[in-house]
Image (cartoon, helix red, strand yellow):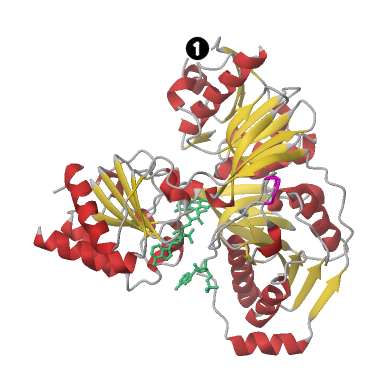
């Protein structure tokens, strides 16, 4: 089973998000980026598949965030065979453009599965997994919470809601939008990441940003008013605890 | 969309939103109904002006490529296509955008038609709101659950029903092997009056004991956000949200939950919501009735002490 995992950095959700001067986008100059958490699950699921069935695992990382190389070295340290960084001077791209770049990188490669996160926090115009599948003309399943392979056939579990799931048999090659791997993404020792850095299995491919065909334009962005609707409790933890007990009692809870 | 033989609530929410677009543009609301043995469900879609039904055994179960293709063929020359941003909708919306070339806007909470087609969207897990516009006069909108009232979409249309033969000539490349329901656990969080809900801010499985202590004092149960369940720290039937359960307890107390749209979807109608988070920007404070910006590990011991003394 040969797999390719598509990795995208997204603004670190823990950081405060600030807007640029004309309010048309985030102020990206000072943003810290992390790997999209669902892509991390996609990588984990691909590692589990590789451990179970053998084959190769390639990771493709998109974009020029400073953190991209670290993300790719981490993937190598976890067990990927090859890592490729796509593009060095890319601005923020629509999902249509991201799909186009990933598809160019996939063309000419042989693979059974492409895995990526079911969504990313900035997917304004659709799911990358489904767009990549459409461009390649191959099937897709989104919201996948586990995959297995034997005898050239792949079985995936898709989650609906309330814990309801459905199993699908899917023709390969196919693209999976991973919601959660069968197990939480593994941690990897810093020493192994350092080893991967010295191993030199990271290559770079230049990418000319494609023209944006998304047809979607952001007019303005804003940070929703903090605590809109909520009455914010002031004071230290003791004051907060007193107030919260009061609220609990007046909510009719004993 | 249909799940387990029933129309989903989001179907009615979309019809309500489509009605508001149609009223402003002078258009009609058309509902696409696809499945096997589902024609009778059209009677519930009185909020639409026309219901196009594809009733065929090929669609007995949801099929990512099959449903995408059939809905893609049903949209015809409609100018506004609304798809729910749900597990099924995710496989459909992007695929029909790719094949039709119509622009797609995700994470929508509202559609606007004056001054060109556009939408309001929630990005970055609800931390940022964006107003967007689309090129041209046709677009697909993937709408977040809970963006409109389902009751607004249950009636008020002309409800003409039209049967259409299965238009697909393709062989489906994904076959459903079976559907599994979760096993019931010891606690049914949908019937608890008090839920203490832990998010990633709880940091470790061991710390959940502190939340449990609080829940015990309040006669309630502990529930969690998705990452807590994915970590295996709580059972699947304790998950609140889009892919978990929808709850409406008397008291919903969140500890270190950021309030992503997928979480909010499952709890926004709780009677009293109290949220604790170190991040003043956390979107959970947008739905909470009361909020405290601070560390849950500072608060929990105080809260437990006060309740024990009470
Ligand atoms: C198809 C799909 C379905 C999904 N379904 C669900 C679902 O059913 N339910 C669900 O919950 N999610 C669901 N998600 C995931 C969702 O997008 C978010 O990733 C998730 O809700 C985030 O969980 P969280 O708030 O616990 O974690 P985070 O977003 O990481 O938030 C943790 C919060 O804790 C705060 N914090 C950290 N330390 C402390 C401290 N010491 N004291 C106080 N606060 C602290 C941080 O400021 C942060 O706001 C789904 C996603 C997808 C794509
Ligand atoms: N003990 C933990 N278990 C699970 N997730 C964590 C834990 N600690 C931090 N996180 C979250 O996991 C993500 C990656 O964290 P880190 O391991 O610090 O890179 C961040 O979003 C953290 O909030």
Up/down of A106 relative to A24, above or below: below
Return the residue nearer the eye: A217 or B106.
A217
Which quadrant would the C terminus of chain B be assigned to in this image?
A: bottom left
Up/down of B132 relative to B183, above or below: above
Given the image, what chain letter belongs to the residue carrying mark 1?
Answer: B
Residue B95 at least partly seen? yes
Q: Is residue B72 left or right of residue B305?
A: right
Up/down of A75 relative to B15, above or below: below
Q: Secondary structure at mark 1?
A: loop
The residue that disc 1 covers is B156
* Residue B74 position within the rendered picture, expressed as x and y whole percent measured from the top left: 70, 26
Q: Residue at x 77, y 41 (%)?
A: B98
Residue A21 lies within the magenta run: yes
CA neighbours of label 1 inside 10 A, class few (<14), some (14 to 19), many (20+): some
Return the residue nearer the eye: A56 or B40.
A56
Which quadrant would the N terminus of chain B be assigned to in this image?
A: top right
Return the residue nearer the eye: B159 or B119.
B119
Residue B93 at least partly seen? no
Q: Residue at x 42, y 61 (%)?
A: B278
Up/down of B164 relative to B93, above or below: above
Residue B69 occupies which quadrant of the picture?
top right
Q: Residue at x 19, y 53 (%)?
A: A245
* Residue B231 position within the rendered picture, expressed as x and y whole percent measured from the top left: 44, 67
Residue B20 occupies which quadrant of the picture?
top right
Per the picture, the main secondary structure of the magenta-coloured stretch is loop
Residue B209 occupies which quadrant of the picture?
bottom left
* Residue B272 position within the rendered picture, expressed as x and y whole percent measured from the top left: 29, 42
Q: Which residues are magenta?
A: A20-24
* Residue A139 position within the rendered picture, expressed as x and y whole percent measured from the top left: 72, 50
Residue B186 lies within the magenta run: no
């Amino acid at each position: 089973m040969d797999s390719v995992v598509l990795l995208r950095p997204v603004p670190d959700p823990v950081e405060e998000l600030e807007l640029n001067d004309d309010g048309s986008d985030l102020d990206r100059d000072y943003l810290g980026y992390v790997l999209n958490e669902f892509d991390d699950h996609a990588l984990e699921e691909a590692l589990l598949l590789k451990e179970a069935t053998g084959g190769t695992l390639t990771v493709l990382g998109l974009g020029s965030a400073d953190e991209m190389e670290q993300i790719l070295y981490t993937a190598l340290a976890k067990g990927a065979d090859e890592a490729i960084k796509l593009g060095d001077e890319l601005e923020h791209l629509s999902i249509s453009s991201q799909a186009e770049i990933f598809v160019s990188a996939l063309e000419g490669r042989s693979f059974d599965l492409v895995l990526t996160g079911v969504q990313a926090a900035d997917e304004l115009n659709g799911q990358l997994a489904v767009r990549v599948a459409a461009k390649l003309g191959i099937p897709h399943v989104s919201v996948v919470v586990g995959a297995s392979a034997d005898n050239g056939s792949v079985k995936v579990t898709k989650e609906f809601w309330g814990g309801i799931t459905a199993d699908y048999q899917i023709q390969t090659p196919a693209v999976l939008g991973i919601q959660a791997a069968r197990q939480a993404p593994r941690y990897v020792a810093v020493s192994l990441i350092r080893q991967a850095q010295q191993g030199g299995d990271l290559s770079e491919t230049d990418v000319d940003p494609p023209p944006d065909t998304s047809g979607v334009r952001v007019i303005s962005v804003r940070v929703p008013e903090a605590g809109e609707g909520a009455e914010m409790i002031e004071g230290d933890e003791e004051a907060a605890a007193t107030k919260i007990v009061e609220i609990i009692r007046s909510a009719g809870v004993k | 969309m249909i799940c387990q033989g029933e129309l989903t609530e989001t179907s009615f929410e979309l019809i309500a939103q489509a009605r508001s677009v149609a009223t402003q543009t002078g258009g009609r609301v058309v509902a696409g109904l696809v499945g096997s043995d589902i024609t009778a469900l059209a009677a519930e879609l009185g909020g639409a002006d026309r219901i196009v039904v594809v009733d065929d055994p090929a669609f007995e179960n949801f099929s990512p490529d099959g449903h995408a293709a059939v809905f893609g063929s049903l949209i015809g020359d409609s100018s506004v296509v609304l798809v729910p941003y749900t597990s099924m909708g995710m496989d459909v919306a992007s695929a029909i955008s790719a094949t039709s070339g119509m622009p797609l806007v995700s994470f929508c909470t509202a559609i606007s038609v004056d001054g060109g087609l556009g939408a309001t969207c929630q990005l970055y897990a609800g931390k940022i709101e964006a107003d967007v516009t689309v090129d041209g006069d046709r677009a697909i909108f993937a709408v977040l659950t809970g963006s409109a009232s389902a009751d607004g979409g249950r009636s008020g249309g002309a409800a003409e029903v039209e049967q259409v033969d299965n238009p697909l000539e393709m062989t489906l490349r994904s076959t459903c092997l079976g559907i599994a329901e979760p096993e019931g656990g010891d606690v049914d969080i949908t019937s608890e009056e008090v839920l203490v809900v832990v998010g990633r801010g709880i940091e470790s499985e061991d710390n959940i004991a502190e939340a449990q202590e609080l829940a015990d004092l309040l006669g309630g149960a502990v529930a969690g956000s998705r990452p807590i369940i994915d970590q295996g720290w709580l059972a699947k039937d304790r998950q609140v949200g889009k892919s978990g359960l929808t709850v409406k307890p008397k008291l919903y107390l969140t500890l270190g939950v950021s309030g992503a749209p997928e979480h909010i979807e499952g709890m926004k109608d709780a009677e009293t919501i109290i949220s604790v988070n170190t991040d003043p920007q956390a979107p959970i404070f947008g739905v909470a009735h009361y909020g405290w910006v601070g560390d849950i590990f500072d608060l929990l011991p105080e809260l437990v002490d006060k309740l024990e003394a009470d």
